[in-house]
Image (cartoon, coloured by chain):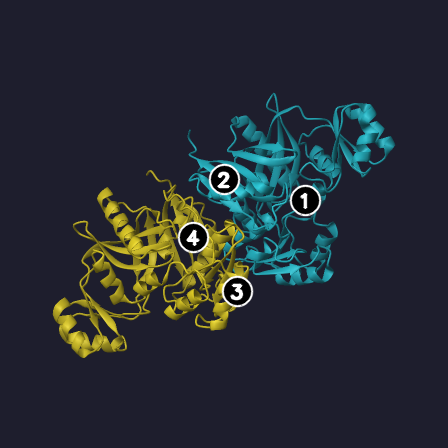
Chain colours: A cyan, B yellow
Amino acid sequence: MAEFPLVPGSTIGILGGGQLGRMLALAAARLGFDVVIQDPEEASPAGRVAARQIVATYDDRWALKRLAEACDVVTYEFENVPAGTVAELAALGAVVSPGAKALAAAQDRVAEKSFLAEIGVPTVAFAPVHDSESLAEAVARIGAPSLLKTRREGYDGKGQAWIQRAGEAEAAFDRIGRQAAILEAPADFGRELSVIAARGRDGEIACYPVSENHHEGGVLRRTVAPAKITPATRDQAEAIAAKILTALDYVGVIGVELFELAGGKLLVNEFAPRVHNTGHWTQDGCEVDQFEQHIRAVAGWPLGPTQPHHHVEMTNLLGADVDAWRKLAAEPETRVHLYGKGEARSGRKMGHVNRLRPLRD
Amino acid sequence: MAEFPLVPGSTIGILGGGQLGRMLALAAARLGFDVVIQDPEEASPAGRVAARQIVATYDDRWALKRLAEACDVVTYEFENVPAGTVAELAALGAVVSPGAKALAAAQDRVAEKSFLAEIGVPTVAFAPVHDSESLAEAVARIGAPSLLKTRREGYDGKGQAWIQRAGEAEAAFDRIGRQAAILEAPADFGRELSVIAARGRDGEIACYPVSENHHEGGVLRRTVAPAKITPATRDQAEAIAAKILTALDYVGVIGVELFELAGGKLLVNEFAPRVHNTGHWTQDGCEVDQFEQHIRAVAGWPLGPTQPHHHVEMTNLLGADVDAWRKLAAEPETRVHLYGKGEARSGRKMGHVNRLRPLRD
């Protein structure tokens, strides 16, 4: 069993070899840790900057055994890690952080919103849907327009269908493949905000400044941080993050997406039990970024400072956006982050840029 | 032949797998490049964060062929790359940056100081030594006390012997193994400064703020940056760096060590054709650090900005110093950088810390 804090030279396992795993691996290396990536894609973006990659699916028991043996702690870059994977790793004696509780809550939209309701964190009104009868009940309760989402697996706007009038409910259910779903009341929000927070093994909590996020077609396009918010809004966001982290006995970085209502009240849209795209601005805006913060937390190290030293506008480079790298590389205020992905498929996250300006302006 | 600027996804080769190669590899990864390390030590610090390591000595022709085939450009982390290695790589069609001219000048202390004299950059008085006769001549010309150094290979105070009186010259020559040497007049300096500068493929030059350096037992202990210097001293340092870079038709980052004399005049002690320990402060003090700057230069990208956003005190963690990692990790103003080296042998560079404070104080 690992002893915390992990001594430098220890090995951190990461499930998932995409850009988040890659940036986690780079942060772990700065602190003197070795990294092992598990990902079914050979020479994944993260695997190419790690000491080792285990090329295997996440339910490959033999691979999990090798991962558990190699690593002092295991973390992940995506919230859809199968529950069986975490159970298997735990049975093999591996410490997985964040833990099974956080994953279970984050993987199922009904469980997530029920958990938030239990701990007194406000969300939009919602109702579970699994067949025509529960759909009709849900629409009767939540009304229309309302948004039908699959309970599991959807991201970046996938697996969602709007119900504009009650009569469209069955058609919407068909569009999401009649999978187990959640019906959500629309949030009448002015802005989408998020807070990136971390909790250490000792229960210490640290929040980065709240950011303002802009989506296009369901995909994050731009994050501006620190967002212009009132101290009251900041306090609300930090209290929400702290409640979630504490209730989940969480270890690591979490991304909490928020809706800001007209009166200033915040609702939680959803949370991701991992480093988050809306936290990429911290790489160039803070001394310790979300990736190092996550590594510090899972390694049992003290959390780092979260105050910003620059104002940052983060823009995702989606698909062919990355072809502008020559121009972006020449902008003095622009820091370029590219993920080492081969094919710039439409909408694929290929990199991001952080544009900096002084904090006081 | 590589086309510059290198497109993201290109491969950068690095000769040498130590901490400088490791930090170069991390910077290359941020910009979307793949890295191949060549180093005789298996699973070297840099190899463990690179896409691939070729485990081979630097004169292994078959290994160099593989490196040349795999890479769009080759660079190095240490100045003692054999001239034959660079010639072999060039013959194989590889672009090596910085080039053979810079290496030749940096590998031989007589060639280095002769080159500096030729381009009008001041150094201490010096004379070449290769036998008893030239030693006697050198001592007659330079006087005593003076410092006898091997022409090649010495670093961190190794291969050096002081001559306090003319009668000690032969004994000092014995102590350095009667190797080809240089006799140098002592510099009556107040401070040791350095300037980290870069030159791009288009001839663009960028200098980081000058740093003040403190050595112990011939090894760098501490760097403070930006150093408190007059604008005239800054101008001198930048002019010196620019002269060297231009005369060598240099591509990449260079570290130029300077002596500041009582009257404010600067002499060059030596230069290293690579990223430099006295530039580690840029990792947390500047938006683009010396490692990304070097990668940008050798990849043919535009250079990044060099202005600081924090005042930094960099301290090397030598040998058992690294055992203080728990305490260091808990200091909010301290950024920890560890190299993933196993054994903390006495004096071995295991990592460094950058302690930050606001620029204006």
Taking the spot 45% from the left edge, 45% from the top edge, the residue there is B332
Spatial CA distance of label 2 from label 1 is 29 Å
- Depth check: B54 or B9 in front? B9
Spatial CA distance of label 1 from label 4 is 37 Å
- Amino acid type indicated by mark 3: Gln
Quadrant occupied by the N terminus of chain A: bottom right
Question: Which quadrant of the figure has residue A55?
Answer: bottom right
**Mark 3, chain letter?**
B
- Amino acid type indicated by mark 4: Phe
**Mark 4, chain letter?**
B
User: Label 4, on which residue?
Assistant: B291
Q: Nearer the viewer, mark 1 or mark 4?
A: 4
What is the x, y in percent for residue A82?
A: 73, 50
What is the x, y in percent for residue A120?
A: 68, 31
**Mark 2, chain letter?**
A
Spatial CA distance of label 3 from label 4 is 19 Å
Of helix, strand and loop, which one carries label 2? strand
**Mark found first going from the N terminus, 2 or 1:** 1
Of helix, strand and loop, which one carries label 3? strand
User: Label 3, on which residue?
Assistant: B53
- Depth check: A310 or B67 in front? B67
Spatial CA distance of label 2 from label 3 is 31 Å
Q: Nearer the viewer, mark 2 or mark 1?
A: 2
User: Label 1, on which residue?
Assistant: A102
Same chain for labels 2 and 3? Say yes or no: no
- How many residues crowd mark 2 within 10 Å: few (<14), some (14–19), many (20+)? many
Task: Look at the image and tell me whether residue B114 can be seen.
Answer: yes
Spatial CA distance of label 2 from label 4 is 18 Å
